[in-house]
Structure formats: C-alpha cells, structure tokens
Amino acid sequence: MTRSPRDHYDAVAVMLHWTMALGIFVLIGLGLAMKHAGLPKARVIQLYQLHKSIGIVVLLLAVARLAWRFVRSAPPLPDALSALERRAARAGHAALYVFMLALPLTGWAVVSTAPLNIPTVLFGLIPWPHIWFLADLPNKAPAFAVAQALHKYGAYALIAVVAGHVGAALRHAVKGDVPLARMSFFTHAEDISE
C-alpha cells in the first residue's frame, strides 16, 4: 500500500510532539514527587527549579508547535473513524493545546506571585523574569492562591487528558484504523526532500 506523505505528521511536528511529550511526562513526575514523595526541603527546592526550567521549555515548544500547526496543518483523520471519534479526537487535541499553554503560564504566575520571590534561572544558566504585572501587585496573596489552584488542578486534568490521548492512540493502533506511524520518526525519510 502506498502512503501519501500527508497520511502522517511531518518531521517537525513529530519532533515537537515527542520532545513535548517527554517534557510533559517529566513535569508530571517532578510535580507529583515534589508534592507527595516527602522529600527533604532542599531537594524539593532543587526539583522546583528543574520543574520551572522544563515548564518554560514546554511553553516555548507549545508556542512553536502552534505556529507550526498554522504553517502546516495536521493530516486528515482516517476515514475509518466515526463522526463521534472525530469529534473526540478534535476535542482531545484542543484540550492538549490549551493545557500545553495554560499550565506553564499558570506555573509562571505562581512563581511571579509567590511570597518567597525566588528567581527563576533556567537550568541554572538563564535568568527568567517574573510576569511584571503580577510581581508588582501590592497584595499578591489572592493572585498566588488562584494561580496555585489553577496550576494544581490543571495538572491533574492534564494527566487525565494525556491518559485519554495515549489510550485512544493505543486503542486505534490495535484496531488498525489509525496507525501509530502517523506520529513516528520512521515514516519521514521521504519527507526530508519535501
């Protein structure tokens, strides 16, 4: 069976997808460890710095991914999917984009309104500013509480959306109606010359 290059995502989209997926899984793991592993405070502070660094990278990658999506649209969904499955796929992808942008932004808001005012230095090398209009609030406590709640509950919602995304991808791969090769590096040898 001959496949059109538009049956799958292009190499840039695949690279962004898997890089972000790795970052998101690491962020989830770090977030859960910081909150629930009972680690010493000094270790938690180190993990917070790493969490913030990876979160900003994910935010920048999400912006790049969204920009790339405008330049190069996603391949069409396979005809084998029902109308309900198509709507669910679109809703799931929209939710992923919302969370990929909203969670780093709410995390940045948490840091910008935190009472301790600890600076963010990405990977210990690059200073990253606070959100100026939040950092300059005379009473940051209400904004901090809202940002913290949005980030915390948003993270749990993201875990559910990611689980649904992975589950749907595996289900369709087993059924054979949406191959995993749509988002694979191994389908792009012919795309390099595009």
Image (tube, rainbow, N blue to C red):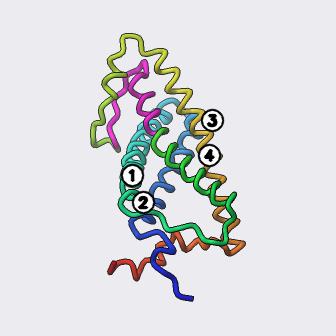
Q: Give the SS element for disc 3.
A: helix
Label 2 sits on what residue type? Answer: Leu
- Closer to viewer: mark 1 or mark 3: 1
Between the residue at mark 3 and the residue at mark 4, the CA separation in whole angstroms equals 16 Å
Return the residue nearer the eye: 192 or 56.
192
The residue at which mark 2 appears reads as 16
Range drawn in magenta: 103-122
* Residue 123 image point, x, y percent: 35, 44
* Residue 83 image point, x, y percent: 67, 61
User: Picture quarter containing residue 194?
Assistant: bottom left
Left or right of residue 130, residue 14 in this image: right
- Quadrant into which the N terminus falls: bottom right
Left or right of residue 74, residue 132 in this image: left
Check if mark 2's residue and mark 1's residue have beta carbons within 8 Å.
Answer: yes
Q: Give the SS element for disc 1.
A: helix
Image mark for residue 36? 3
Residue at horizontal 41 percent and vertical 70 percent from the top: 11
Image mark for residue 61? 1
